Structures are given as structure tokens and as C-alpha cells.
Amino acid sequence: MEHPIIYGVCHDTTVARVTVTGAPTQPGGATAIFRALANSGIKSDMAQNTPAPGGRNDLSFIVDESDAATAMAVLEQVRDVVRFDSVSVDVRTGRVTMIGASLRSNSEIIARYFESLRDAGVAVEMVAATDNCIAVVTRRWEAAKAAEHLKATFRQGEPRPLL
């Protein structure tokens, strides 16, 4: 088994969460949304699709806060094509990211990550996890506290091993 290595923890309070509500579940709906954003030069991250009533979906993702108004305008332009109900932006959003290697090689890593956030009193709103990264969306005012708590939990700046 490979041993996980934590390279660092950081937070970002310059993001906004965009939510497209009531999108049909047909193939290509999300494609049209992300193509429209890409054509406008808007980068998106951490997409999460959630089933909604009536066989529809709510699609949330984050963008740079500086792109939030443009993202809203772009999505309103494709609203009739995609046939979603509404689009909203929440600029009170923060992202907390832990970067490492072989993070999935030990089941304790993600458990400790979420225990740390719980102990810090931080509510998690979205999650993205890979072998090299665990990232969550939180409230903007909780992001710095979450990052500091994760650094303490994973003893950033101290010699290894972490587990």
C-alpha cells in the first residue's frame, strides 16, 4: 500500500457558486451549459448534479467570483435551449482544498478530513475528491477556519508520517 502524502491545504474566497435549477435529465443539457461558459472564457470547477423533483436536475458548480455576473448572463442566453427553470449565483462561497498524493490509498484520510471540518464547525456544501485532491465548498467566512483546522489535523509543517 502506498503511503499518502499531504503537500498542502489552501482556501479560496474568490469563488461563487452557480446553480442551474430544474434542468431536464436529457443527454446534452449539461454539455450546452458548460459549452456556453467555455465559449465565454468562463472556467468552472466542482460540478455537482443533484436529482430534483419531476425528473429534473439541479446543477451546481463554482466559477471565479469576477465571472459570476457574466456566467449568469451567458446562462440566461441558453435557458430556452436547455430548458432549465432558473439560474442563481451565491457569492458567499469559499473553497478549501487539500493537495497530496495517494490520498485514496488510506481510508483514514477522507474520514479525518471530514472529522476535522466537523470539529471546526464547518458545514460542507459540495465535495470533489480524487487521489491527489480533496476539495469542499463552504461558506466564505468558514474557509480560512476550515483550512487552518485541516492544517492542524494533518500536521502541516511537521515531519511525516501523517497516519
Image (cartoon, rainbow, N blue to C red):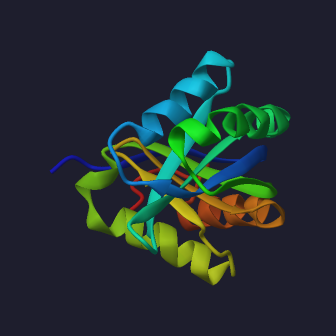
Residue at horizontal 76 percent and vertical 56 percent from the top: 93
In front of the other: 55 or 149: 55
Q: Is residue 56 above or below residue 112?
A: above
Q: Is residue 75 above or below residue 155?
A: above
Relative side of 118 to 94, left or right: left
Which image quarter is the C terminus in? bottom left
Q: Nearer the viewer, residue 138 or 143?
A: 138
The number of numbered badges drawn on the structure is 0
**x, y percentage for residue 134?**
47, 52
Residue 59 in the image: state x and y as whole percent.
53, 54
Q: Is residue 104 above or below residue 118?
A: above
Q: Residue sitting at 72 percent across and 39 percent down?
A: 76
What residue appears at the point 44 percent right and 33 percent down from the top-left corner?
Answer: 31
Q: Is residue 148 left or right of residue 59?
A: right
Say if residue 123 shows up in the picture.
yes
State left or right for residue 148 relative to residue 14: left
Residue 88, position as x, y percentages in the image? 74, 55
Residue occupying the far front of the picture: 80
